Amino acid sequence: MKAVDTTIALFTLAALSPAAAFVPSAASRAALGRTRALPQKSQPTCAPADKSSAVFHSGKGASALFGTGPSYTDVVSETEGDEDGDEEGGKKKKKKKDKKSGGDKEKVKLEAEVTFFEGGPDPSEVVAPAVSILTVIGIVPFSAALARQAWVKYTLTSRRIKIVSGWNGKDTTEVVYPDIVDMVYVWRFFGRCGDLVLTLRDGSKLEIRSLPDFERNYNYIRERTSASCQEKSAVLKPQN
């Protein structure tokens, strides 16, 4: 009977051993209870542990992906600084240019043109043609002298010499004083007026006939020519 009981006990133990594998032991149940009793801790987020591990960080140094070098914010700040510097430099340059241009304008600015003499040929040039009108040939020079009195006009200013002539005063000739290289004169009608011939740089000659108040006007023109022209031009000698 003992043998039968032993055999039955062995078979019973063999049948129960697979199910016991799935039943937790007393030690396992105690550990599980302690784990549930502990407070739950907050899980870490996906944010980087420190600022240096971020791809773009605020400070200089190494980045997680791109190695050492300036950060994005550094590049932006430096670019803005360069732009500000360029703008300030451009403003300074503009100010300097404005100052220079203002100085140049002041230098280039000319004085107002002043008229020294304005009038036609001296009327004494009509006397001789009027006497010659007694002959048939004298009619032509007399008519020319009258036309000159009506249409010819001389103007001397601080900058130039202007001569209006031609039919009905339609021709205008202007000469600036630096273009004059030589001056030759001759008195007319006993010193009442004079003829003046001007030689210009291009070799052409300009004649001013019967210029009134000749001594005063001649000296005025000569004083405004170049030094070389004054050396070549004769000093005016009063007519006795």
Image: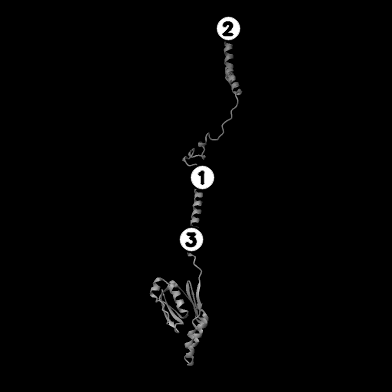
Query: Residue at point 52% right, 80% down?
Result: 169
| Quadrant location, the N terminus | top right
Mark 1 or mark 2: which comes first in sequence?
2
Locate residue 15: give its quadrant.
Answer: top right
Mark 3 or mark 1: which comes first in sequence?
1
At which x and y percent is residue 109?
A: 49, 65
Q: In this view, does 208 lie above or below 55?
A: below
How many marks can you see? 3
Indicate the secondary structure of the residue bearing disc 2: helix
In the depicted view, which residue is nearer to us: 12 or 49?
49
Which disc number belongs to residue 2? 2
Mark 2 and mark 1 in contact (Cβ < 8 Å)? no
**Mark 3 closeness class: few <14, some 14–19, many ≥20 residues within 10 Å:** few
Three-letter amino acid code of the residue under disc 2: Lys
Q: Is residue 3 left or right of residue 137?
A: right
| Residue located beneath label 1 in the image | 77
Q: In this view, does 11 lie above or below 84?
A: above
In the depicted view, which residue is nearer to us: 41 or 231?
231
| Quadrant location, the C terminus | bottom left
| Residue located beneath label 3 in the image | 103
Q: How far apart are marks 3 and 1 (CA)?
A: 39 Å
Q: How far apart are marks 1 and 2 (CA)?
A: 96 Å
Q: Distance between the residues labelled 3 and 2?
A: 135 Å
